[in-house]
Image (tube, rainbow, N blue to C red):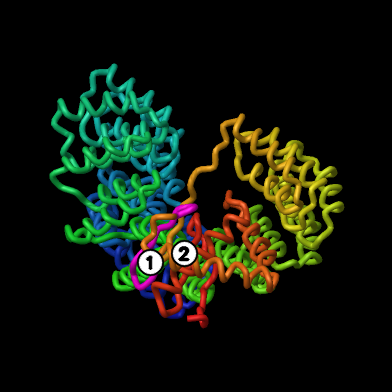
């Protein structure tokens, strides 16, 4: 006698149970019942026994009858559920039926289930694949080449290379697809050496490569900078007529770019008959990586003209190029394109915009982008905190740092160095000590060289150079160039020759070719009036071949970019600029502002010019902006760092 169907009174229990364990609603429970209804039938006793046998976390309600010997119906039902996107339901039915001895499942069902495991967007995908694979072996079903290839492909792409290799080694016959899956898996997971070795094994076994093989191996060569092997593979691509294949071509130009052969990369790019967004991104990234910002932007324009839609990998590269070239107007236009394309502000794209606006001093704009990011990483928080810090808004940086922790993000070593730098820029000595002393106890982070250097900056910039020196002597990290550099910077601000010489002596040994250290000490000598010491230091620099090159900077006025070089005498407005420069310098000296500017400029550690030369460059650029424009302008220095937004009531 058939068992009556489940009453509606039982569904609330199922619905409550799913809240705790599974994503099943009442309707989905009904769907499961409907699926089982076609091939399940049993007596009341058997139904009760089956319910007890079901996994405790599922407790699914079985329908009112079970039809025996319906293997075809079982297989078709599971396969249809997978095709309809109800993979989890199909998987649960599979596990339920595996507990019955009288139900057999054919190899096609296993193949469909393995496909479903591969397509799962869940961390459970690998574990589910292992379970299905284990059931398959226990059932005595022979794992043929097709199923083995699916397993290898799934394991390799999920990063489970050991599992993939075990299945691969047991395969009696290995086709090209399986070799490609293994090689691609190694490349994807950063194990390029193993990928190259497996490629050699494949060639030794007489397997002929295809375009996917070539593309994967070329990417392995790119990550290892194996230019010689990459050139040989390029020759293979030409012989096999794969050089115009978009997948192989993109891998080739990426390989040449990462090996420093940007001209060869461009030749490959130009010869591609069909270019997709990956090809354009690879070439654009190659130019940006080697400092060709103008070419980067020009190629981006060509990409738009060709009708290729940029993606979330393209825009961060373009935004960084705009930042380096001081093109705030173009950067805003790029941001507008991002909004028009409705691209999600992920970690990379959102972080690039936050960095861009922060460097330009547009902290409010940076925070607006930050707030619109749907998901934030610790990198995003660090970038926003750093933005407040470098512009002297240390208290706001601290508030954001505390908010980050309240929202469940655990600070890392970069977070701590960022907040310490913020305290340094803003003169928050007590807060800096508080965070430094709590690093081990509250955050489980041992101080690194950069953290100690931040503390030296905090102590030194507060005027306590002797305390900063004694702090360095107690640092457990030997040969800490960061800390000695911070002390030298503080000595330059306060014109302390004695401690400056001590710091410089250590730095000349640790970083003998870093010209910035020599220039800092030279500036201390000049400021202290020690001309003989300065002359000896210049002679030392000449003997060591440390010649200061010409520095370059840009300023954007009315959409036009003006470039300047140290000691510029060729600018068309040079007469007006230098005349006004002389007048302005005199007024700055009388007002005592030169020391303030020197202090500000030393806060930019990347700059290698002395404050004296930087003041001249800064004044030169400001005056040029005054003369060219009657509006506010933004000034960007040697490395694309913003000095300030300038109003010029003088004109």
Quarter holding residue 184: top left
Residue range highlighted in magenta: 557-568
Give the residue number, with chain letter if any, for mark 1. Answer: 331
Give the residue number, with chain letter if any, for mark 2. Answer: 356
Q: Position of residue 291 (x, y in %)?
A: 40, 47
Which of these two is toward me, 140 or 531? 531
Q: Is residue 144 left or right of residue 602?
A: left
Q: Position of residue 442 (x, y in %)?
A: 76, 59
Which of these two is toward me, 429 or 117? 429
Quarter holding residue 43: bottom left
For residue 354, say whether it is visible.
Answer: no
Q: CA–CA distance between discs 2 and 1? A: 8 Å
Q: Is residue 389 above or below residue 167?
A: below
The residue under the point 30% across, 63% down is: 35
Q: Is residue 636 left or right of residue 307?
A: right
Q: Quadrant of the N terminus?
A: bottom left
| Mark 2 burial class by Cα count in 10 Å: few <14, some 14-19, many 20+ | many
What secondary structure is marked by label 1? helix
What secondary structure is marked by label 2? helix
The residue under the point 42% across, 73% down is: 627
Disc 2 to disc 1: CB gap under 8 Å: yes
């Amino acid at each position: 006698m058939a068992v009556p169907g489940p009453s509606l009174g039982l569904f609330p229990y199922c619905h409550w149970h799913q809240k705790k364990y599974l994503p099943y609603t009442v309707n989905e429970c009904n769907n499961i019942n409907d699926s089982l209804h076609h091939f399940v039938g049993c007596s009341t006793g058997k139904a009760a026994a089956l319910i007890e046998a079901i996994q405790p976390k599922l407790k699914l309600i079985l329908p009112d009858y079970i039809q025996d010997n319906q293997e075809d119906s079982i297989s078709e039902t599971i396969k249809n559920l997978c095709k309809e996107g109800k993979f989890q339901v199909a998987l649960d039915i599979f596990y339920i039926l595996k507990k019955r001895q009288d139900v057999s499942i054919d190899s096609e069902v296993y193949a469909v289930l393995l496909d479903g495991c591969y397509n799962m967007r869940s961390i459970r995908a690998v574990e589910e694949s292992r379970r299905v694979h284990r059931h398959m072996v226990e059932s005595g079903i022979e794992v043929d080449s097709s199923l083995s290839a699916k397993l290898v492909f799934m394991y390799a792409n999920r990063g489970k290379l050991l599992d993939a290799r075990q299945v691969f080694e047991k395969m009696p016959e290995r086709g090209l697809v399986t070799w490609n899956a293994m090689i691609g898996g190694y490349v994807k997971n950063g194990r390029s050496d193993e990928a190259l070795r497996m490629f050699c094994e494949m060639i030794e076994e007489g397997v002929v490569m295809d375009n996917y093989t070539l593309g994967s191996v070329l990417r392995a060569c790119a990550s290892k900078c194996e230019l010689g092997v990459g050139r040989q593979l390029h020759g293979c691509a030409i012989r096999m007529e794969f050089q115009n294949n978009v997948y192989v071509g993109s891998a080739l130009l990426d390989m040449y770019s990462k090996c420093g052969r940007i001209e060869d990369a461009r030749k490959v790019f130009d010869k591609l008959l069909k270019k997709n967004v990956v090809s354009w991104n690879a070439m654009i990234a190659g130019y940006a990586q080697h400092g060709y910002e103008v070419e980067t932007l020009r190629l981006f324009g060509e990409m738009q003209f060709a009708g290729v839609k940029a993606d979330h990998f393209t825009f961060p590269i373009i935004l960084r190029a705009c930042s380096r070239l001081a093109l705030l107007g173009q950067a805003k236009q790029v941001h507008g394109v991002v909004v028009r394309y409705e691209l999600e502000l992920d970690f990379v794209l959102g972080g690039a915009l936050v960095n861009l606006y922060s460097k330009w001093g547009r902290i409010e704009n940076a925070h607006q982008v930050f707030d619109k990011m749907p998901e934030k990483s610790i990198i995003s928080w660090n970038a926003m905190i750093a933005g407040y810090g470098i512009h002297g808004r240390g208290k706001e940086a601290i508030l954001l740092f505390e908010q980050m922790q309240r929202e469940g993000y655990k600070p890392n070593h970069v977070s701590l160095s960022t907040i310490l730098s913020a305290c340094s820029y803003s003169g928050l000595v007590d807060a800096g000590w508080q965070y430094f002393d709590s690093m081990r106890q509250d955050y489980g982070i041992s101080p690194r060289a950069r953290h100690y250097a931040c503390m030296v900056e905090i102590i030194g910039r507060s005027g306590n150079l002797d305390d900063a020196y004694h702090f360095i002597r107690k640092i457990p990290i030997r040969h800490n160039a960061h800390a000695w550099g911070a002390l030298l910077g503080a000595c330059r601000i306060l014109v302390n020759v004695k401690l400056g010489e001590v710091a410089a002596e250590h730095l000349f040994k640790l970083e003998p070719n870093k010209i910035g250290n020599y220039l800092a000490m030279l500036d201390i000598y000049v400021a202290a009036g020690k001309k003989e010491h300065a002359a000896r230091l210049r002679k030392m620099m000449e003997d060591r071949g440390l010649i200061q090159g010409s520095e370059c900077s840009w300023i954007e006025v009315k959409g036009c970019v003006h470039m300047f070089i140290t000691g510029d005498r060729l600018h068309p407005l040079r007469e007006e600029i230098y005349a006004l420069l002389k007048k302005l310098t005199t007024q700055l000296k009388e007002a005592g502002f030169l020391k303030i500017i020197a202090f500000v400029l030393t806060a930019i550690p990347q700059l290698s010019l002395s404050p004296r030369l930087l003041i001249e460059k800064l004044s030169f650029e400001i005056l040029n902006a005054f003369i060219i424009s009657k509006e506010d302008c933004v000034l960007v220095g040697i490395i694309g760092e913003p000095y300030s937004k300038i109003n010029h009531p003088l004109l």
